[in-house]
């Protein structure tokens, strides 16, 4: 019991620091909706980079990705990580500067729906409303994955029932987000990015030490059919209830499966999601100076490359040190927790566990805040009550926060939820809904309002259709829904834009000014 108290003290200490950050920034955050939702475009390069990646990676970096590697080996986890790394780099390189500039030109837009609506000079806020609606839908799903992480973390650590632990974690995140807004969220995300990096480094170093070296881990992985291959995948032998069988004290695996080129493309497609991730795109808009984005990109890439590599290797290491500890794909996501509590002194384990909490908080507060701003600014103020005051917008945003959190809690009630699967669906939703139109809006002058609307609706719809129907056919159709949905959305945007009247002279003038860099700094 003393060990658990030490872990709890460490985690409470961490959460206290996070709350203090919220209190410090609360006054400035509540000065205006721009400060609350975008931080007054005042983020420096380090905070921009670390908060973008910490809010993006979330608890699945410390639980979902290691769990995937632990369960079926290198291929799925590694190709996903490679896709994410490529997507991160291209997003910072191609999108960040143009979006920062264009968001100022587009009537100083402070939310993603604002940007799309102002980019096409809408009088009737159709794009604004549609994009806000999809943000609400997919971020509610995303937030539920964070609450599942909280539930698994606390229930595993303290041998407590999953549902009460999940609800406690969700309420803490909700309270913190309401308190401090975007500035507090970004400042704490910077700290949380450091904590996450520390946690990953400690655990992988400890794992290698306990295993007796990297060669021991690799030799064990190679002994499992398909486990340590880029072009093959391991298949745990399961019983009727989905639990991996144990034979002579060792986990049983069936014959390995081939890993096709189509499957590789499917996993690399995770990188396409970055072009439509609101929590990352908002950081591009919020940085104080456009020229600081280059430094942010370098910081972000170093963090991402090391963190993803380490997360995958933790899962591989887990199969050597704890081969029969986790016998379901849901339980496998607890391998990081098992390492920490088994091999670290209790207080240090609590600090490392704070890394998971850090990842979860940094993501869920982003998701809740962006979803709330989407409704309050882009539906309530733009459509329902156009004369709403800033104070009213802030009030509605907090009511929306509560509503979204309650729905996400309901979704997260299933203790057998697999974090990676929940995240993958929401990731596909954002990537296909906003990724193609973001790229076309920034780089193709001929893109029309009608093309934008059709592209968003078709991309989002195809995610649901492919996931729930087409993928069930199997074979070549059993690919990650983001890839076909992204391609379909892009085709629809081009086709509808070419079939409709070209943009007005004012819209084209905006595009040319942004392209030429003729935009005043915000």
Image: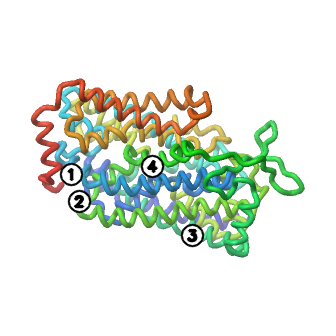
Task: Name the quadrant containing residue 512.
Answer: top left
Q: Nearer the viewer, mark 2 or mark 4?
A: 4
Q: Nearer the viewer, mark 4 or mark 1?
A: 4
**Which element type, helix, strand or loop, lies under badge 4?**
helix
Task: Report the residue marked by disc 1.
Answer: 101
Disc 2 to disc 3: CB gap under 8 Å: no
- Residue 33's place in the image compared with 122, above or below, is below
Q: How far is disc 3 from disc 1 in space, using C-alphas? A: 36 Å
Disc 4 to disc 1: CB gap under 8 Å: no
Residue 50 in picture, x, y percent from top left: 41, 62
- Left or right side of 103 for 420: right
Q: How far is disc 4 from disc 1 in space, using C-alphas? A: 23 Å
Mark 2 / mark 4, whichever is N-terminal: 4
Mark 3 / mark 1, whichever is N-terminal: 1
Disc 1 to disc 2: CB gap under 8 Å: yes
Question: What's the mark number on residue 290?
Answer: 2
Q: Is residue 362 visible?
A: yes
Task: Report the residue marked by disc 4.
Answer: 271
Q: How far is disc 1 from disc 2 in space, using C-alphas? A: 7 Å
Q: Nearer the viewer, mark 3 or mark 4?
A: 4
Give the class, few, some or many, for how many residues have Cα within 10 Å of label 4's Cα (few <14, many ≥20): many
């Amino acid at each position: 019991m003393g060990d658990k108290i030490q872990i709890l003290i460490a985690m409470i200490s961490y959460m206290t620091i996070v709350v203090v950050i919220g209190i410090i920034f609360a006054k400035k955050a509540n000065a205006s909706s721009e400060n609350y939702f975008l931080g007054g475009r005042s983020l420096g390069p380090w905070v921009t980079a670390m908060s973008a990646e910490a809010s993006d990676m979330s608890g699945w970096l410390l639980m979902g990705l290691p769990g995937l590697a632990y369960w079926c080996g290198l291929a799925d986890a590694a190709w996903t990580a490679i896709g994410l790394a490529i997507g991160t780099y291209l997003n910072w390189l191609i999108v960040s500067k143009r979006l920062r500039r264009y968001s100022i030109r587009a009537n100083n837009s402070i939310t993603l729906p604002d940007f799309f609506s102002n980019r096409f000079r809408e009088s009737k806020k159709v794009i604004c409303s549609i994009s806000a609606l999809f943000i609400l839908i997919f971020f509610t799903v995303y937030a539920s994955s964070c609450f599942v992480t909280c539930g698994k973390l606390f229930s595993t650590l303290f041998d407590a029932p999953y549902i009460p632990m999940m609800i406690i974690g969700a309420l803490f995140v909700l309270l913190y987000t309401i308190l401090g807004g975007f500035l507090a969220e970004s400042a704490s995300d910077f700290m949380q990015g450091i904590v996450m990096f520390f946690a990953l480094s400690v655990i992988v170093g400890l794992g290698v030490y306990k295993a007796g070296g990297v060669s021991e881990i690799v030799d064990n992985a190679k002994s499992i059919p398909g486990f340590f291959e880029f072009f093959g995948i391991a298949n745990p032998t399961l019983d009727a209830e989905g639990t991996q069988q144990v034979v002579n004290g060792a986990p049983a695996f069936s014959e390995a499966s081939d890993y096709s080129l189509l499957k590789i493309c499917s996993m690399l497609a995770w990188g396409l999601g970055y072009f439509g991730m609101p929590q990352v795109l908002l950081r591009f808009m919020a940085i104080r100076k456009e020229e600081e984005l280059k430094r942010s990109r370098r910081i972000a890439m170093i963090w991402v490359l090391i963190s993803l590599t380490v997360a995958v290797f933790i899962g591989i290491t887990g199969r050597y040190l704890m081969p029969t500890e986790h016998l379901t794909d849901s339980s496998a996501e607890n391998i990081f927790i098992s390492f920490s509590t088994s091999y670290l002194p209790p207080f240090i384990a609590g600090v490392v566990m704070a890394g998971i909490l850090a990842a979860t908080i940094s993501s869920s507060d982003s998701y809740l805040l962006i979803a709330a701003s989407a409704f309050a600014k882009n539906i309530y103020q733009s459509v329902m009550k156009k004369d709403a005051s800033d104070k009213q917008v802030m009030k509605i945003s907090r009511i929306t926060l509560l509503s979204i959190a309650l729905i996400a809690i309901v979704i997260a009630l299933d203790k057998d939820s697999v974090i990676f699967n929940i995240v993958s669906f929401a990731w596909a939703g954002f990537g296909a809904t906003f990724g193609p139109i973001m790229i076309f809006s920034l780089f193709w002058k001929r893109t029309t309002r009608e093309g934008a609307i059709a592209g968003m609706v078709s991309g989002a719809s195809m995610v649901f259709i492919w996931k729930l129907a087409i993928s069930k056919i199997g074979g070549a159709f059993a690919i990650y829904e983001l890839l076909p949905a992204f391609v379909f959305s892009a085709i629809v945007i081009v086709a509808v834009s070419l079939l409709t009247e070209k943009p007005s002279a004012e819209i084209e003038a905006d595009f040319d000014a942004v392209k030429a860099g003729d935009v005043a700094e915000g």
